[in-house]
């Protein structure tokens, strides 16, 4: 009997040693130490022994069982340590490697440009005014000397708002001039920046775009003031003090005279070509870039907001912000500004 116990013990220990998983150990535990296990068989057969043998063999059996139970627990602990070692081996990290900088976002280049414009005009004493994106026909057109059925309205491919009578997505930032003058007495020095909307979509037009509007009204405002302010603006935003401006006669119902504003190309400096006679692509070799419209505020517009047009004069201008951003950053497709592709945006 004693040797049977010894054999069982060495078998159990060998099997335990070879076990590779908790499940295997559990099976062995059941096989040897379980209620119907091999050890209990031995315990049960003790009853057939003499009293003397019962004592010695029983003692040995009990000791061996305790020993095996301890060996099982030890094996469980070993397996756990082993599992930990495997994970540690796989998932180790080098704490001396320099950290990765978290990806912090940044302002979009249009928003950044708008901030810059506000700073440039802020230094010239201009305040910033805001108006709604959904505008009434009254402010978007009528007050700007563009009555219903006036052909000038055709210039602006308007989105009329369904089910909202006589409301539009503002086609320009000019209505903010009116709103501002209605609530402020002259002198006025104000700009307004924001989204504008037109039914236009191609390589150089997007149905949503941004404009900057400027307005200055006082007792002695002339085209000379307009020229000075716009030249300074363009020199600042294109970071080139050699930039010149020129005005070409044009028509906008809310100004008289009205004009188109051009500036010398900041790439070829008005030459139309680069060093080595390479043609300038930005201005298409013309040396000038069209920037936007401007003019002297029409007396009718001043009267519409209750200003005395005999006493006050003013200038106004409206430029496309997106185009200026494209010129400044040498971006050749308008869409890039609006697609929010990080491969593009992260370059700035
Ligand atoms: N509102 C005009 C447009 O979007 C641009 C413009 C032209 C604004 C002349 C002005 C101006 O203030 O004087 O087509």
Image (tube, rainbow, N blue to C red):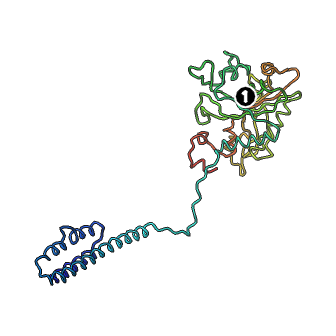
Q: Residues within 10 Å of mark 1 (few under 14, many from 20)?
A: many
Question: Measured along the vertical axis of the image, is residue 41 above or below residue 225?
Answer: below
Figure quadrant of the N terminus: bottom left
Residue ID at (61%, 39%): 334
| Numbered circles on residues, count | 1
In the rendered image, the residue lying farthest to the left is: 48
**Element under disc 1:** helix
Residue 16: x, y in percent? Answer: 27, 74
Left or right: 131, with 73 as reference point: right
Q: Quadrant of ligand 1?
A: top right
Question: Measured along the vertical axis of the image, is residue 168 above or below residue 128?
Answer: above
Q: Which corner quadrant of the image does residue 250 belong to?
A: top right
Question: Measured along the vertical axis of the image, is residue 270 above or below residue 7?
Answer: above
Label 1 CB sits under 8 Å from any ligand 1 atom: no
Q: Which corner quadrant of the image does residue 290 belong to?
A: top right
Q: Which corner quadrant of the image does residue 65 belong to?
A: bottom left
In the rendered image, the residue lying farthest to the front is: 51
Residue 169: x, y in percent? Answer: 62, 26
Residue 27: x, y in percent? Answer: 24, 67
Q: Observer-nearest residue: 50 or 251?
A: 50
Q: Observer-nearest residue: 46 or 139?
A: 46
Residue 127: x, y in percent? Answer: 78, 35
Left or right: 47, with 80 as reference point: left
Left or right: 6, with 79 as reference point: left
Q: Observer-nearest residue: 243 or 153?
A: 153
Residue ID at (56%, 70%): 96
Which residue position is annotated with label 1?
176
Left or right: 169, with 262 as reference point: left
């Amino acid at each position: 009997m004693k040797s049977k116990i010894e054999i069982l013990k060495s078998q159990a220990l060998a099997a335990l040693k070879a076990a590779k998983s908790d499940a295997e150990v559990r099976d062995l535990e059941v096989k040897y130490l379980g209620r119907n296990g091999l050890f209990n068989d031995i315990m049960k057969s003790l009853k057939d022994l003499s009293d003397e043998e019962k004592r010695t063999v029983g003692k040995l059996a009990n000791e061996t069982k305790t020993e095996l139970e301890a060996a099982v627990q030890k094996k469980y602990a070993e397996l756990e340590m082993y599992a930990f070692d495997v994970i540690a081996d796989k998932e180790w990290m080098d704490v001396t490697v320099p950290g990765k900088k978290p990806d912090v976002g940044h302002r979009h280049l249009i928003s950044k440009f708008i901030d810059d414009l506000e700073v440039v005009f802020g230094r010239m004493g201009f305040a910033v005014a805001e108006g709604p994106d959904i505008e009434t026909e009254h402010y978007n057109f009528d007050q700007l000397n563009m009555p219903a059925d006036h052909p000038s309205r055709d210039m602006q491919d308007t989105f009329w708002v369904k089910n909202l009578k006589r409301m539009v997505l503002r086609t320009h930032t000019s209505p903010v001039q009116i709103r501002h003058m209605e609530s402020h007495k002259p002198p006025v020095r104000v700009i307004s920046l924001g989204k504008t909307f037109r039914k236009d979509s191609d390589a150089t037009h997007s149905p949503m775009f941004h404009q900057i509007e400027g307005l200055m009204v006082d007792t002695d405002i002339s085209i000379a003031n307009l020229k000075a302010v716009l030249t300074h603006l363009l020199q600042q935003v294109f970071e080139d003090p050699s930039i010149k401006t020129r005005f070409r006669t044009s028509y906008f119902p809310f100004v008289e005279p009205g004009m188109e504003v051009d500036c010398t190309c900041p790439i070829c400096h008005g030459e139309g070509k680069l060093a080595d006679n390479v043609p300038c692509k930005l201005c298409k070799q013309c040396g000038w870039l069209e920037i936007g419209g401007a003019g002297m505020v029409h007396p009718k517009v001043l009267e519409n907001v209750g200003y005395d047009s005999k006493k006050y004069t003013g200038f106004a201008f409206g430029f496309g912000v997106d185009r200026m951003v494209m010129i400044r950053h040498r971006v050749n497709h308008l869409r890039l500004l609006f697609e929010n592709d990080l491969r593009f945006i992260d370059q700035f």
